[in-house]
Structures are given as structure tokens and as C-alpha cells.
Image (cartoon, rainbow, N blue to C red):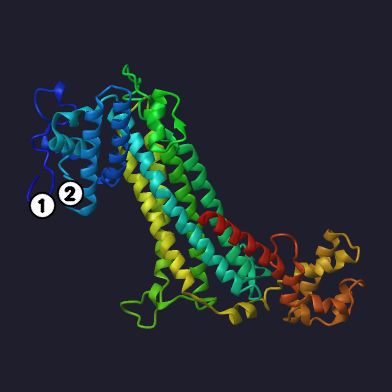
Amino acid sequence: MNDHGTMTTDNHAALWHGRFEEGPDAGAVAFETSIHADERMALDDIFGSKAHARMLGETGIITRTESERIIEGLDSIERDLLSGTLSVDYSAEDIHSFIEATLTDRIGEAGKKVHTGRSRNDQVALDERLYLRRAVPELRKKIINLVKTLADLAEKHTDSLMPGFTHMQHAQPVTLAQHFCAWAWMFTRDCGRLTDALCRLSRSPIGACALAGSSLPLDRKLEAELLGFDEVTQNSLDSVSDRDYCIELASAFALIQTHLSRCCEEIVLWSTSEFSFIDLSERWSTGSSIMPQKKNPDFAELIRGRTGRVYGDLFALLTMMKGLPLAYDRDMQEDKESLFDGFDTVSSCVSVFTQMIATATWNTQRMASACESGFLNATDVADYLVRKGMPFRTAHEVSAKAVRIAIGKNCRLEDLPIADFKSCSELIEDDIYKMLTPSACVASRKTEGGPAPECVQEQIKKLREFVSNGEN
């Protein structure tokens, strides 16, 4: 151990050195090492090694005394890493080599028995699963908190009118609450995907060894139980060559980031002078180095921009795996940087987005006034006629004719004289006017999931149930 508490491995050859007469070139070592990427799995590697030592002792492959000494040594390494009295030695080939070498330094020859009945091939597959099983629920908690934040915002804005858009054109009036709920439902699906992925990930690969299992009497099921897995993987070749769990989670990360990016695109639009729907907090905005009046939605833009990075992580994993023969290939070492980068990026973006939205203010008056233009109530004219027995396709044509008249008169539909409406259809009476206000249009849309206040309240109730179930 050096003066800084770092365990040096200068005197510890690579785990595979026995086949070679000379050591690798320094440049080759620097090129192949993965410890900068996999050091975050140190505690998971220790946890896995303790279970492995316990299994080896229980099966008599090593003595119980040796098993206990290994576990005690690993406990001491864990304590020292957590306290900071031990630092990872970046000259080690990987985190597995560092921990095994440190263990051997501390307890002697018994430390060399920790690797009995396993390979780094099944060990790294185990460590990744253990790490993801620990880390992904933390991301899921962040997303659940985001859903809660959106539900809270929706509760405040069930009567806040705003235009809904298709093709970025005014379509029909909705409410800000309906829009918040739309965002929230996207993120509930993201939580479901993370949960599903964790279910498939809960299989222990340890005991598959390099690719063909072991001739030693390993108890894979006991070790899986000690590790808290649901069961063991069923094929040794597949166990060490499978990275579906990495790709599946990277895909889930990409979808989360897609949803964040779409929300941020709307925030960027809504923060423009042309929209002026949202005023972002100064804590989540930046200025210009040359234009003193500017207040830029940089954080929304950065989240939107980092989406490409998360997509790249997914495609890197897919491309890495697409041509690999069974079983393990060293290409697979490259999975960790993409997987961890995708996780880190999404996790930080979810946190920033949640705070940015929670601290924003909403120009509900501006939103409501935007509902007065663009003929958002044209469909309601057609629905009015349908309720009077007219076929919808005919009613659609009648409503379109009324819109053309209003365009010609440069007025809103609700400002057309009744004579103009009757020139389109004799079925139209004075009662149509009370149905053409934005609030009336919204209130009439009571189908499940619609924007009517009572429907949105039901959505909010279900979102809160989702949050409550997810937190428990």
C-alpha cells in the first residue's frame, strides 16, 4: 500500500500471466484496462465474491475457515473503500483483479482461492447485474418523483385553458393539466420498462465460468439465493455472452430521454416571445454574453441535446453485439462505458428536468387567449350537428364552410351571426354559441382520458396511485 492508501499491484501479475513468458507492453496494458469504467462496481464485486466464498465453503470446495477468512478480508476492503482509506489502483487491469490482489495481500494464500470455480467472464456478468439491480431502482425513484411533480402541477391547472396542437397548428382547446398528465403517463411507461428489465435481469450467471461451467461441485442455486437472485441462468454459453440486459436497459434509457426531449422541445417553444406560455426560473436559465436582455432555456436545450448521446450509447451496444460469436469476446468489455454513460446521462437529465418544471411559472392568461384564435372550436360545430342527427362527414363539411365564412369576415366562429351559420345548415340554432367557448369545448370532452376537468381529476388520482405504489 502506498502513502496515499492505494493498493499497488506492481508485484501482482495479471491473473492470466501463467501462459506468458514476458509481460505485456505498457501501452498494451493502458489500452486494455477497464478499471476506470468498472470501478463503480467495486462494492458489487465484493458482494458477489463474499457469496461465492460462502458457497465454496458450504460445498467443501474450500474449508469453512478459508471461506470465513476470505469473507472477513473482503469486509475489510469494503470498509476501507467506503471510508476512503483505500483507493482503487488504476494500474490494475480491472476491478476484479484489484480486489483479488488486495485480498491476497491482506490474508495471504487463502485470497487466491476466491476465484475457484469462476471466470472473469461470469464474474463481470454478475457484477453488472448486481450493479444495475442496485442503481436502476434509484433512477426509477427519480422518475416516480417526476410523475408526482407533474401530478401536483396538474392539480393546480385543471381549469387553465390552452390550445392543443397537431402538426404544430392550433387543433382543439385542452388544459395545461391535461398536458402535464400527458407527460406524466409517458414516464409511467418508462418506469414499467425499467421494472420489466429488472425482472429479466434477476438471474445469476455465476458458475457458468468461462463458458462451459465447472467440474467442481458448485452449488449455483445456493449462490444465487445468497445474492438475492430469483434463479440461475440456464445455459453456460449464453450466461457469459448475454448482454441483453445492457441493451434492454439502454433502450429504456433512450426512451426516457426521448420523452424528456419532447417535453423540453415544448418548453423551448413555450418560452419564446411568440408563445410566452412559460417563464423558467432564473435558477434554471442562462443569459447571453453579448445580448444583456436574453433569458435562455439552456437546460431544456441541453437535455434535448444529450438525447443524441444516449441514443449513441444504445447503438454502440447494439453494434458491439451484432456480430459476436458465442461465447465471451473481449469486445464485450466495451459495454460498460456505454451502459454507464447512458444511465448517468438520463439520471442527471431527469433530476434537472424535475427541478426546472417545478420552479417554472405559467402564463395561464396568455394560454387562454391563445385559444381564441385558430378556430379550435370547429370540431365542436360538427359535433353539435351530429347530436342533431347529421352524419359526421356531412357535419364536417358544414363546419368547414362556416370556417371559410369566418376567415372571409376576419372573425371567430363564435362571432358569426346566426344567419351565416344557418346558411351552412338550417339545423343550427342560437344554442350553438354556448357550446363554442373554449371552456365549454373542454368541458364537453368527457370521454375517459379527455381534458374535461373531472376526467383530468381521474387521471391525477390514478397518477397519484401509481406514485404511491411505486414508493412503497
Q: Position of residue 359 (x, y in %)?
A: 46, 74
Q: Image quadrant of residue 322?
A: top left
The residue sitting at 24% across, 42% down in the picture is: 75
Image side of residue 204 versus residue 188, left or right:
left
**Which of the pair 294/101 is nearer the observer?**
101
Under mark 2, the amino acid is Ser
Circle 2: element type:
loop
Neighbours of disc 1 within 10 Å: few (<14), some (14-19), many (20+): few
Under mark 1, the amino acid is His
Of all residues, the one furthest to the top in this rendering is 215
Vertical order, 252 against 245 (above or below): below
Q: Position of residue 99 (x, y in %)?
A: 21, 39
Q: Tell me the distance, in whole angstroms, between the alpha carbons under discs 2 and 1.
A: 8 Å
Q: Are marks 2 and 1 in contact (CB under 8 Å)?
A: yes
Which mark is on residue 4?
Answer: 1
Q: Position of residue 269 (x, y in %)?
A: 51, 70
The residue sitting at 83% across, 82% down in the picture is: 417
Q: Image quadrant of residue 302?
A: bottom left
**Which of the pair 138/330 is nearer the observer?**
138
The quadrant of the picture occupied by the N terminus is top left
Circle 1: element type:
loop
Neighbours of disc 2 within 10 Å: few (<14), some (14-19), many (20+): some
Q: Which residue is mark 2?
A: 87
Which mark is on residue 338?
Answer: none
